[in-house]
Amino acid sequence: MRKSVYLAMLMLAFALAVTAVPLAYADDLAPYGTTKAGASIDEVTVSADSDNLAAVIDGCTFAVGDFQRASKGSNRDIAGQYHGYAYYIGSKSDSVMYIATDKAVVVYVDPEAASAAGLDMASESDLAQLQELIVRLDAQAGGGSALIADSAVWYFTGQQENVLDGAAYRFNQTIDDGAYNLVVGVDGSDVTDASSPNHVQLSFACFASLVPAGEAVIAAEPTWFESLGAFMSTLDWSPLFVTLRTTFTAIVIIFVLGLAAAYFCLHRTARFRNLFDTIFTIPMVLPPTVCGFLLLLALGSNTPVGQWFIDIGFPLIFSWPATVIAAVVVAFPLMYRGALGAFDNLDPNMLDAARTLGWSEGRIFFKIMLPLSWSSIAASTVLAFARALGEFGATLFLAGNYLGITRTIPIAIYFEWMNGNTDIAIFWTIVLIIFSFFVIMFINLWSQHTTRYRKGAVEE
């Protein structure tokens, strides 16, 4: 009896001694810390090569390299069975992996890699350095996405399968010739289900390699000129060419159709003029997405018009001509309204006088109406050009987003920003602004020159 009591007291004392010591590495996922333990470490050097992110700390024996981040995983069955929420690792071998949630960061470190790299998993200072390397690399790879919360509890483990708050974290699991990191309820339930008692709000997962500090490849920060050269050399210039091709083609069509429509309405009775004027102006007041949707309904593959173009081998939808059609439709009203207003301001007596002299309507148009209305027509052309240049909604609806075919600069700006490529989105925005500025300036100077020339000719 005394031996049993003594043994029980000894086990209790041992348990109290263990829990009194902060656990830096435990297979039962005891928390290492509740804040960024490495925040005071300033000697961290992060590689400037985004394709091979690596980081080292001065005086540290190990480093972290080949850092990659998976913002989302998959919650579907794998090989016909549900294994939980899965982050696909890939074919490469990673020795450091972690899964971040809204409250915790569970880090798996391969024991053999830790030993080879000189990382002592029983040392709080070593784990603090590893934590700081992870935090710095995560901030570099985040690209504006959610980062590890400062209040997150960190857990370090060398076991591939662990349990935390009813959720099983399984690292480097091979399923159907693929490697995954999995998070599943201990009862096999879906942890992403908010109604589940094992619910976990997953954030992202990351994978990296733990290597000796001397083997880490740290690319130096490039100069501004080198960064610009690398940016320009890797940039896809196809949105610029698609935009120029689309806009210049569209403005020629808009110019001709706008003048023709204005001249047509000029000679109509008030009733018919109001009707056609409404039809020609509607695209200017409708949202571009509505215009694109209506065009899709009118020219889609299920319509007679769309099917006819398909039959002759010239499909309209999701092709480059669709970008021109969208630009023409949304920018045409600006050209039409400006030209019609210019023609309305002409003195009808002057036109009648020309007719009495035997001038044809075509000669009157090109010799009198067009030159006298040129300033307004030029301004309308500028507005229509700018509208076609910046067209987005109708183009996306009718032409889609196909690189090198229908992706114009406005569409490229939107999708590059959505994909986190802010630098590319800013670059295309600047290009669009500069290009628009010079085109508008050129047309304005040309218009002013022709106006002065006409005034000088009249005075003589």
Image (tube, rainbow, N blue to C red):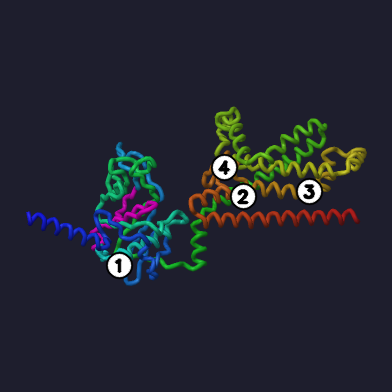
User: The disc labelled 2 sits on which kind of residue?
Assistant: Leu
Q: Nearer the viewer, mark 2 or mark 3?
A: 3
- In the drawing, what numbered circle is on residue 358? none
Residues rendered magenta in the picture: 88-116
Against 229, residue 249 (above or below) is: above
User: The disc labelled 3 sits on which kind of residue?
Assistant: Ser
Image quadrant occupied by the N terminus:
bottom left
> Can you tell which quarter of the image residue 256 is in?
top right
Residue of label 3: 376
Residue 179 seen anywhere in this rendered image of the structure: no
Residue of label 4: 396
Residue 137 seen anywhere in this rendered image of the structure: yes
Q: Nearer the viewer, residue 322 or 57?
A: 57
Label 4 secondary element:
helix
- Whichever of labels 3 and 4 marks the residue nearer the N terminus, that label is 3
User: The disc labelled 4 sits on which kind of residue?
Assistant: Leu
Q: At 40% across and 59% down in the image, what residue appears?
A: 150
Q: Residue furthest top?
A: 304
Q: Is residue 377 left or right of residue 251?
A: right
Q: Alpha-carbon neighbours of circle 2 within 10 Å: few (<14), some, or many (≥20)?
A: some
Is residue 90 inside the magenta stretch?
Answer: yes
